[in-house]
Amino acid sequence: MTLWGGRFSTKLNDLAWELNSSLPVDGRMAIQDVDGSLAWADALYKANILSDEEHASIALGLAAVKEEFSSGQFSFVPSDEDIHTAVERRLTELIGPIAGKLHTGRSRNDQVATDFRLWVLEAIPVLNAALKDLQSALVEQAELAGETLMPGYTHLQRAQPILLGHWWLSHYWPLQRDRERLTDLTARVSILPLGSGALSGTPVPVDRAALAESLGFAVASPNSLDAVSDRDFATEFLFCATMTGIHLSKLAEQIVLYTSAEFGFFELSDSFSTGSSLMPQKKNPDVFELTRGKAGTLIGMLTGLLATLKGLPSTYDKDLQEDKAPVFQATDTLLAILPVIAGALRTITAKPERMRSAIDSFMMATDLADYLVSKGIPFRETHAIAGKAVRAAGEKNIGLEELPLEAYQALCPAFEADVYQVFDPLKSVEKRNAIGGTSPQSVKNQITKCRKNI
Ligand code: ARG
């Protein structure tokens, strides 16, 4: 059975059928399709299109179909072109030709857009929860880190000392914004297309506001042409997913780098690292590399859907059938990555002594300039003086802490014996005490803020 065919003299070519069929993808919206149909049956009943018995029979039949899906008992048949056809075909088998009344005033165009929005609305909190758990893992590590120091980098060159906890939390906040983005998006997904018909609206006098409410949507779409044709909600969802992918990729790249022997800042637990079939000594950060790699695939899904939408004439075009696969795949990708990364981070071991030994006194050159600022000299001048000290120490192949006091005083008479305290990295971080800085107190305050969101 197809949901069309009256005007055709032959059936669709087999290969064209294969191309046209969307069941392998939209089969995932089975529950949403049945729920949408149940709500539509209620709306038809309230609009006096269905009698008491017809409504009861359709509602019972749909409940049975839903139960078949939920219990994994539903069997598809080769003629099921898409999930909408499959549901209606099965309903017909169960309750007979009365099932044919369900599609009154409805089109697969408003139906599919409704199913898809319902699916995305359900995916958002699931993703949110997975993001939240990863945030918890980051906060746990930040707490564990205490006053552990590590080198901070710019341009991947040693820059200034920071607290390890501050670094962990630098990966927390992007995920917080990702969660906020998803939550904001909910309002734009929560717009009901059902009742828009194929494109021009439904002739059935349904109360669309009540219909929206019954399906958990915030509002009914205000324009039928727009409702069946736009997929900005799906694109925006893909952007959110892709942005998360990119945030995870940045974290992953740093873990890959920091677990290398050259850095040695962390060691992965055995349960989250992999070996080599040839080199017995290898311990590889595959899960982080896959995370980095999948961010690229996510970008492809987002740009792919944008390209599909570009230049489509209003309203429904079959190109739109390409919308679901990337959204499903992006969701699956993130739900596969997020718990693994959370697990890997919960079991990673930090190596504070390696981190500490990567902090050299040159990383306190800014503090040296600030020291002279505290003696009343303008920063622009102190920057140059500290730079000269760096050069002098570099030429002698010694650290800034080894440069004799006379050498400092030759550069600037304001230097005194207390200058050497500047080279204590803990003192350096302690000074960064304003909101958002790396001082132990700031990081503690930050952890308190972080805890409120998880
Ligand atoms: N399978 C279609 C999709 O995913 C459903 C809508 C079909 N509408 C139509 N007029 N053929 O977009």
Image (spheres, grey):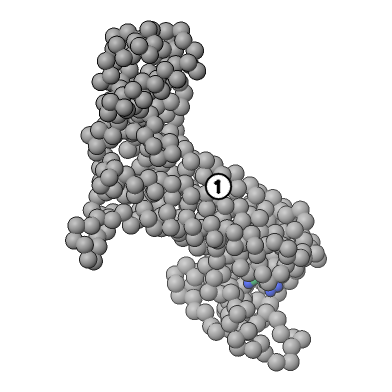
Residue at x 67%, y 69% (from the top left corner): 319
In the rendered view, does 145 fall on the left or right side of 211? left
In which quadrant of this rendering is ligand 1 seen? bottom right
Q: Is residue 404 above or below residue 100?
A: above
In the rendered view, does 415 fall on the left or right side of 203? left
- Residue 166: x and y in percent read 38, 32
Image quarter (top left, top right, bottom left or bottom right) of the N terminus: bottom right
Residue at x 50%, y 63% (from the top left corner): 329
Whether label 1 lies within 8 Å of ligand 1 gets the answer no
Residue under numbered circle 1? 182
Numbered circles on residues, count: 1
Image quarter for residue 308?
bottom right
| 155, 61: nearer the viewer | 155
Q: Is residue 413 above or below residue 298?
A: above
Q: Say whether residue 331 is visible.
A: no
Q: Is residue 185 above or below residue 71?
A: above
In the rendered view, does 296 fall on the left or right side of 263? right
- Residue 134: x and y in percent read 39, 45
Residue at x 47%, y 43% (from the top left corner): 175
In the rendered view, does 35 fall on the left or right side of 131? right
- Residue 190: x and y in percent read 64, 51
Residue at x 48%, y 52% (from the top left corner): 245
Image quarter (top left, top right, bottom left or bottom right) of the C terminus: top left
| 280, 4: nearer the viewer | 280
- Residue 235: x and y in percent read 61, 56
Q: Say whether residue 318 is visible.
A: yes
Q: Secondary structure at mark 1?
A: helix
